[in-house]
Each structure stands twice: as C-alpha cells, then as structure tokens.
Image (cartoon, grey):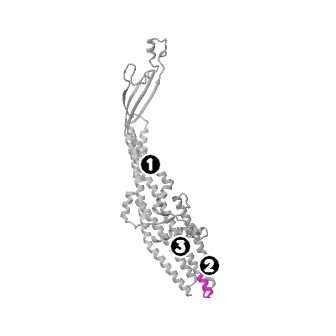
Amino acid sequence: MHESNWSRIAGASAVLAASLLHGTRPLSAQASPSPAITLDEAITRARANEPAFAAAIAQSRAADLDRSIARAALLPTAVYHNQFIYTQPAHGKTGSANASAADASISSEPRFIANNTVHEYVSQGQATETIGVQQITAIARASAAASVAKAELEISRRGLVATVVNLFYASLSADRRVVIAQHAEDEAASFLKLTGQREQARESAHADVVKAQLLEQQRQRDVQNAAIEAQKARLELGVLLFPDPRSAFTLTAAPTSALASRADIEAAATKSNPELKGALASLRASSLGVTSAWAAYLPDLGVSVAYGIDAPEFAIHAPDGVKNLGYSATATVDIPVWDWFSTQHKVKQAQIQRDVAKVTLSTTQRRLIAQLDESYAEAQTAQDQLASLDLSVKTAEESLKLTRLRYTAGEATVLEVVDAQTSFTAAETAREDGDLRYQAAVANLQLLTGTL
C-alpha cells in the first residue's frame, strides 16, 4: 500500500471504528485531538511499560555489578577491628587490698594459656588479600556472564520490538479494513438505489432489488466486524503504549525502506545478531568455568597486615612508657591435598556444561542461517507481489465500473455486479494483507541485522 494512504486513514479510521461500535457517526467538531504515534515512538513507549523488558534490564545491571564485585575480590579489604577480652586470672583476685605483691604478679596471668593477659584491648586496622587462580578467573567469568546478560537484554528488546511492529502494522491494516468495508457498504447502498430506480422504470425485476438488499445487509455486518477487529487491535497496542489502553491515538507510518542486498543483510546479521552473541558469551563463560574448577587444585596465597594496639590497657603508651602501637603481618599458603574427588567432579561438571554450550552455539548458527533465508525470501516475495496487488485493485475497480455501466444499460445481470463488487473488495483486502506481510518481513530482517 502507498504510504500516503497510511497517513490518510490513520486518524479518521480510528474515530470511525469507535463510532461504528457505538452506532454513531463521528463529528469532527467534537473529536478531541489524539497524539500521533510513529513506530519509533511506539517502541519507546513499549520499552517503558513492558515488565519482561524491565526484568531483562535489571538482570543486565545486576550482571554488571557482579563483575564489579568479582574485581573487588582481587583488591585488599580493610576493616577497623576493636575488641576487649577478659580472661579469668590464674590465681586469686587482681586488685585485692590484702593481696601481696607476689600474689598480684601471679594473679596478672590469665587462666587460659591461649590468651595474653587478664585484660586485653585490641584496636587495629587490618588489610587482607587473597590471591589465587579462582579469584582471577572469577573476573573473566563475571565479564562473560555480563555479556550473556546484555545479549539476553538485546534478545528481549528485539522480541518486544517485534511485538510492537506486528501490533502497529496490524492496527494500521485493521483501520484500513474499516475504510474498505465502509467503501463496500457505500457501493452496495448505491447499487441498491440503482436497482430500485430500474425497478420503478420497469427495466429490471424485483429480484434484483432483493439481491441488492441482501448484499447491503451483508456489507453492513462487514463494517461492524471490521470495526470490532480494529478496536481490538488498537486495544492490544494500547496496552503497551498507555496507562489506559482505551486512550485515543493515531498511527503514522514512515516510508518503508527498500530491501537491502542479500550480502549486506548476511554481514549485518552475523555481526549484530544477539542470539549468536549470547551463545558465544555462554561458551566463553562455560570454558572459564572449567578453568575455575581446575584452579581448586592450586594453592591460594593469603596476606594480612594489622596496625594498632594489642595491650593490657587501651592507650597508645603503656604505664612504663613503652609504645603500644605496632604492626604485624602474616602470609599463608593453603595447598590442597585431599577433598574426596569433589574438585575432580566439579571439573567434569564444568566440562559437561561447556559441551552443552558448544552444541547451543552450533544450533544458533544454523538457526540464524535458516532465519535469514526464510525472512529474506519472504520479504523479497512480498515486495515482488506489491505491484501485482496494486494492479489487481485497479483492474477490479475498472471491472466494477464497467459491469455497473453494462447493468445500467441492461446488458449485465445483478449477479455479475455483485460478483464484481465482491472481487473489488477482495482485491483491496488482499492488498492490505500483502502490505502487512511485507512490513512484517522487513521488520524481521531489521531485527536480525540489528537496524531496528
């Protein structure tokens, strides 16, 4: 269908469909202005309102934060540690007035040999870091998981776009069908008037009037059905676009872009297809999972540095003037020895998941090839048929005019006129179906190539 027709019918047919549902004719003076929605604006509105797409965005952001968390695990962590420890004295009670000096020295020893003194104050800043292959691999795995999440977000976005595109052009087509049905009803009413005039002039039988009445009644039902379908299509689209799906709006279609060459489409699809990117990222993540599982066989190096006080009194200097502030450092190396084959089994699990990712990648590549062939062939066929469908409409319209002239001259029967009217309506409907088919095929190609 020509793009000028889309803009011509977008607003008027929506009001017409609503008015037909309520049994009234639209009044331009009473019609409130409604926003004009283009396909790009419809996609933008749908992205803000669709919950599944919002969940995909949240998942992608969470994956980015996981990568930041994994990177932070390689950096030292610092805490300010404060602790007071009281341990029961080994003998007597410290600070007793009757205790001798010897008893006091004995009572300053703690009862537990692991503790340092009866009263111990710890206030230290501690920095700790653990370095190992698992921690290093975790960053790469988090990056791969973030790539997978981004690919899934793009898949979700393109799925939403495909839904909006289908609903957008389906609504436009439904609006146009209302106009076609209304034209058919007007034609049937005009023909009924013609048969009545010919009957009064005794140029035709009353059977022609009956046949014309039956045709007009059917056309009226067709208008009502088309109006219902148009209203349903607009409500389905309104759910994605507005808080109230009953909001009035008009649709404006942009000129359809020409079909690109097969080589350009294949190159763009290979570069920008989200399913392929997601499969590649999943394979990389599963391969890193094998590396991470193998890393459990290797030792980890742990380093800890502390600076502060660990003394019998909470003070920078002791009563004898000695400075309590100091530092300590420890380094540990844990070498795995025996874990009852759990690491070996984790490596096998990771290898199994990697093999599945390889199969998924191969299947995704084959499916992409098939989708490209199917979508391109569909778009090319639909494009080739548009000119033929336009010619069929013109031919059917000319045939209807000639048949009516022949009927007026008494050279054609009422059945021939009815058949010509039916053929003209069918041709217009077929043209709308062809337009919708071409728009959907082009949109599928644009989704595969990442241009929409």
| Rendered residue at 49%/55% (across/down) | 48
**Quarter of the image with the C terminus in it:** bottom left
Q: Are marks 2 and 3 in contact (CB under 8 Å)?
A: no
Q: Position of residue 391 (x, y in %)?
A: 46, 76
Label drawn at residue 178: none
| Rendered residue at 55%/87% (across/down) | 409
Disc 3: which residue: 180
Residue 407 visible in the current orientation: yes
* Relative to 349, residue 245 above or below: below
Label drawn at residue 213: 2
Q: Position of residue 2 (x, y in %)?
A: 45, 71
Give the extent of the magenta segment. 192-204
Between 399 and 35, which is closer to the camera in this rendering? Answer: 35
| Rendered residue at 48%/67% (across/down) | 436
Disc 1: which residue: 61
Dominant secondary structure of the residues highlighted in magenta in the image: helix
Q: Earlier in the sequence, mark 1 or mark 3?
A: 1
